[in-house]
Amino acid sequence: MAGEITETGELYSPYVGMVYMFNLIVGTGALTMPKAFATAGWLVSLILLVFLGFMSFVTTTFVMEAMAAANAQLRWKRMETHKEEEDEDSSTASDNDILTQDNYEQAEKQPILSVQRRAFPNLFEITDRVEMGQMASMFFSKVGVNLFYFCIIIYLYGDLAIYAAAVPFSLMQVTCATGNDSCGVEADTKYNDTDLCWGPLRRVDTYRIYLAVFTLLLGPFTFFDVQKTKYLQILTSLMRWIAFAIMIVLALVRIGNGQGEGHPPLADFSGVRNLFGVCVYSFMCQHSLPSLVTPVSSKRYLTHLVFLDYVLILAFYGLLSFTAIFCFRSDSLLDMYTLNFARCDIVGLAAIRFFLGLFPVFTISTNFPIIAVTLRNNWKTLFHREGGTYPWVVDRVVFPTITLVPPVLVAFCTHDLESLVGITGAYAGTGIQYVIPAFLVYLCRKDTQLAFGYGTVNKHRSPFHHTFWVGFVLLWAFSCFFFVTANIVLTETKL
């Protein structure tokens, strides 16, 4: 998410790209979705899930169109620069050519008119990985760029707060239940934070101890550079799909045996606020599209494959949530769905109970340092001035500290994961998923027409290319923003 052009990376097939996008979208948000479904009612939840999935697909195509437009502008500037160098000295070698893509070296040695006539459609090929920050710098004003980084930073803070709360909460649920009852949490058991966990220690004390340990172990990575390795990604993805498969199968078996306890309502609009935020959070991928889409070797049917990905993700979310709400009573569903399987009557094998209970600990712990470093780098980019450098203390101490402290403080004050995910999705998520893509595609279309003429067609143009869709997305985003805010104010006023 840094605001620059980065290396494309190793190319992969479109179907591998589909798998990567599926893994990116289906993350922590999916674990909070069952409770949100049960709270809002199954019919309302299904309608909102399908609609928000569609809206996310629309803005995903917006971002891909903006990526193609950014590539076209960068490629055209390189061609112009190359032509100027040839005009200055036709015998000079092209050692100083700034083009880094080998595939275009031959094309750029041709006369500019020849390139313009023959290769014009290829201007919009997505070959450079232009990150969201760089696109914002190309198409937005200075104020727009600052607002973009502000939105990204708020979203990442919300992400880190969710991660910082989810790990200690899962550890508290598993270890406190084990300490008080060797067979886990029983169906009718309701715990408060003030209940005892071990000896004189209350559950909230245990949670905060785990939070302190989590911060001490993973917090220092914020002060260094961390890269996500390929094998770590494969391991966490494998664990995630094993956990999801086990939960879905166990829930289906219980429902099939007539042991389902859930009787969810058709609709309960009081739960729509959190459901909206959870669904937006659960479809979030727009900020990572440059790193996902650019390395795809063939982009001919890219939009079709992305649409298929969204259909599969919708089907998966529906299967996970519906099996959950009909297997468990609404009032017994926990914020982190995996913790519902810490019961002996659900899972007889202790190893599986502990695996599911501690699953968020393993997967989230590997992602926390990466998100923290990304947030720290965005802070640096926001305050960076051309040609300037930061003092060592600011670079190595101040930026990592302001990255780490706020989310840990939020996690210290609350472990209400459904609300954390809901608020993060409803506010910062709305900005990243709706507002930024809509403005990006609108402004990039204007720039493309000015640079290449009004008849120019972007080969990766969104199917929703009418201006109506841009207005509709923005209207929806602002409507949701006001609805969620009004709902929060009314709820707090009643309390």
Image: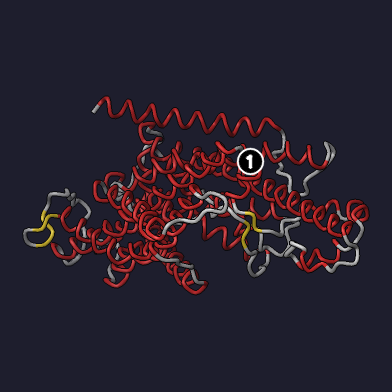
Give 1 or 223, whichever is nearer the viewer.
223
Question: Which image quarter: residue 79?
Answer: bottom right
Question: Which quadrant: the C terminus?
Answer: top left
Q: Residue at x 29, y 73 (%)?
A: 351
Question: Which image quarter: residue 218?
Answer: bottom left
Task: Report the label total.
Answer: 1
In this view, 7 is above or below 275: below
User: In this rendering, would 340 be left or right of 378?
Assistant: left
User: In this rendering, would 444 be left or right of 184?
Assistant: right
Residue type, numbered disc 1: Leu
Q: Residue at x 55, y 36 (%)?
A: 143
The colour scheme applied to this rendered structure is secondary structure
Q: Residues within 10 Å of mark 1 (few under 14, many from 20)?
A: many
Q: Residue at x 47, y 67 (%)?
A: 237
**Can I make out residue 258 in this image?**
no
**Can I make out residue 347 in this image?**
yes
- Residue pointed to by mark 1: 440
Give percent across and percent down for residue 39: 35, 40
Give percent across and percent down for residue 84: 84, 54
Residue at the bottom extreme, as displayed = 231
Q: Secondary structure at mark 1?
A: helix
Give 338 or 83, whichever is nearer the viewer.
83
Give percent across and percent down for residue 225: 45, 66
In this view, 452 is above or below 253: above
Give percent across and percent down for residue 331: 27, 44
User: In this rendering, would 2 be left or right of 493?
Assistant: right
Give 252 or 213, whichever is nearer the viewer.
213
